[in-house]
């Protein structure tokens, strides 16, 4: 099974919007679902999409409107299907 690559921007704009909380939420979900060997979570610097929420990509596909309030929902909708 291929590894799912998830990148979360930690540049200044995304940092101010809560990107570290998103990373923390994703980490907790990866651990609780035992997906450490299936999901590679990485921090990235500016992805040039500062106006559409926290910049996140899943296998290089941009995910729009990510925030710390919907991080679990984003994980379940966009990351979990690739890890199953």
Image: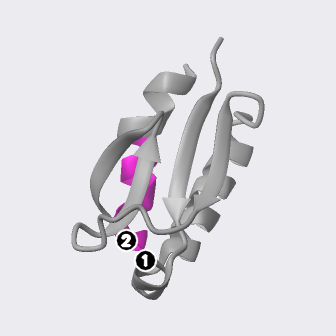
Percent position of residue 34, x then y? 74, 35
The residue that disc 2 covers is 69
Q: What element carries label 2?
A: helix
Graded by Cα atoms within 10 Å as few (under 14), some (14 to 19) or many (20 or more), the crowding at tag 2 reads: few
Q: Is residue 79 left or right of residue 64?
A: right
Residue located 23% across and 67% down the image = 52
Considering only vertical position in the picture, is 57 above or below 78?
below
Q: Is residue 72 left or right of residue 20?
A: left
Q: Which of marks 2 and 1 is nearer the N terminus?
A: 1
Image quadrant where residue 2 sits: top right
Q: Is residue 73 inside the magenta stretch?
A: yes
Considering only vertical position in the picture, is 3 above or below 77?
above
- Name the disc covering residue 14, or none: 1
Q: Do the residues labelled 2 and 1 touch (CB within 8 Å)?
A: no
Quarter of the picture containing the N terminus is top right
Percent position of residue 35, x then y? 70, 33
Magenta residue span: 68-76
Percent position of residue 41, x then y? 65, 48
Q: Is residue 12 left or right of residue 69?
A: right
Residue located 49% across and 32% down the image = 80
Q: Is residue 39 inside the magenta stretch?
A: no
**Which numbered mark, 2 or 1, is in the foreground of this view?**
1
């Amino acid at each position: 099974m291929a590894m799912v690559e998830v990148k979360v921007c930690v540049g200044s704009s995304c940092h101010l919007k809560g990107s570290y909380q998103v990373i923390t939420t994703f980490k907790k979900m990866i651990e609780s679902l035992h997906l450490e060997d299936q999901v590679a979570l990485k921090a990235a610097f500016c992805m040039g999409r500062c106006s559409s929420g926290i910049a996140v990509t899943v296998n290089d596909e941009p995910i729009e409107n990510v925030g710390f309030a919907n991080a679990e929902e984003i994980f379940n909708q966009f990351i979990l299907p690739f890890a199953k």
